[in-house]
Amino acid sequence: MSKVIGIGETVLDIVFENDVPVSAKPGGSVYNAMISLGRRGVKSLFVSEVGNDHIGGIIRRFLVENGVDDAGLCSFEGGKSPLALAFLDADRNAQYTFYKDYPAQRLQFAMPPIEQNDVLLFGSYFAVNKVIRDKVEPLIRTAKKSGAMLYYDVNFRASHKHELNAIMPTIIENYKYADIVKGSVEDFEIMYGTADVQKIYTEYVAPCCKLFVCTMGKDGVLLKNVDGEAHIPARPIKPVSTIGAGDSFNAGFVYGLITNKITKSDLYRADVLSVIGRPAEYGVEFASEVCQSYENYVAKQ
């Protein structure tokens, strides 16, 4: 079976409801997805960094306890593992405050083995951060050369909008590396000032990557390529927290790629939208489950 390599940040997520802390869990966008994959028995390895401190220990142990290889998780001295405070509003969406204290030397990991038809999951600000781009980009490039499938989740937050012009060339570079570009309509509205999925795809994504997955909340998911589109409906649920929704969708989608034995060449078939329909359904299933709890990952089986 193919494996999944994820690269992204780690944090300890502390969730507040009505200004009262109700949950504290290890997190990070790709980290959350990797926990879900580990819980579903997918062979997974996570590349990131934590402080050599108590919180770093919590993050590492939780990763291993959930079946994810921590060989790519490096510990740093001279800083502290980051915290994320998430304040839920009436719609169960979160406003974040981050506390970060990184050392000058970061992300000192050894390149993991990557084989054809493995999946590399990357995205969020971690994938465009100029401070660590020289560490992240070689892994992306190696995965591309090895014949892995590259799944890029844009996951662009409004808090980074002031940097958009500076980091847009890196976002475009990631589009070009990717076999699948995924994002939410909220991401693209922040970035491009439009929620028109056709315009987003035609003008911004398709010139770099032909396969596009756009999540639209209660309106479901739109899959697009140059030949057309397919729609996957959302499930009617009453959300408790939407914090892990996008991350869980990614986990479900990648789970579908692996369990349905979809290969990189399959992603370039004319009927690719039917090929990835089942992975997208898994994405909706995983996201729906996670939205109904304070967890950022699917339950253990």
Image (cartoon, helix red, strand yellow):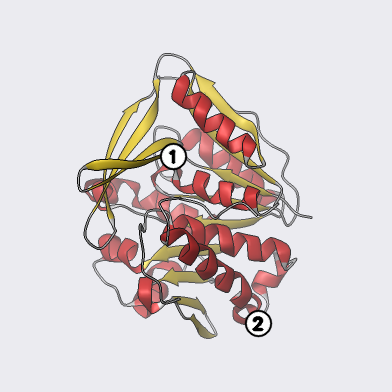
Return the residue at label 2.
270
Q: Residue at x 43, y 54 (%)?
A: 244
Kindly identify which numbered label has been placed on residue 25.
Answer: 1
* Residue 105, x across and y down, in percent: 46, 20
Is residue 206 at least partly visible in the picture? no
In which quadrant of the rendered view does residue 266 lie?
bottom right
Name the residue at the right extreme: 1
**Real-space Cα distance between discs 2 and 1?**
42 Å
16 is higher (above) or lower (below) than 251: above
* Residue 171, x across and y down, in percent: 41, 53
Residue sitting nearer the eye, 49 or 267: 49
Q: Quadrant of the C terminus?
A: bottom right
Left or right of 213 on screen, residue 104: left
Is disc 1 surrounded by few (<14), some (14 to 19) or many (20+) residues within 10 Å?
A: some
**Tag 1: residue type?**
Lys
Q: Residue at x 61, y 60 (%)?
A: 254
**Tag 2: residue type?**
Ala
Q: Secondary structure at mark 1?
A: strand
Q: Quadrant of the N terminus?
A: bottom right
Left or right of 70 on screen, residue 187: left
Is residue 63 at least partly visible in the picture? yes
Q: Which of pointers 2 and 1 lies earlier in the amino acid sequence? A: 1
Left or right of 42 on screen, residue 220: left
In which quadrant of the rendered view does residue 280 lie?
bottom right
Kindly identify which numbered label has been placed on residue 51.
Answer: none
* Residue 240, x across and y down, in percent: 35, 59
Q: Secondary structure at mark 2?
A: loop
Residue sitting nearer the eye, 112 or 237: 237
34 is higher (above) or lower (below) than 102: below
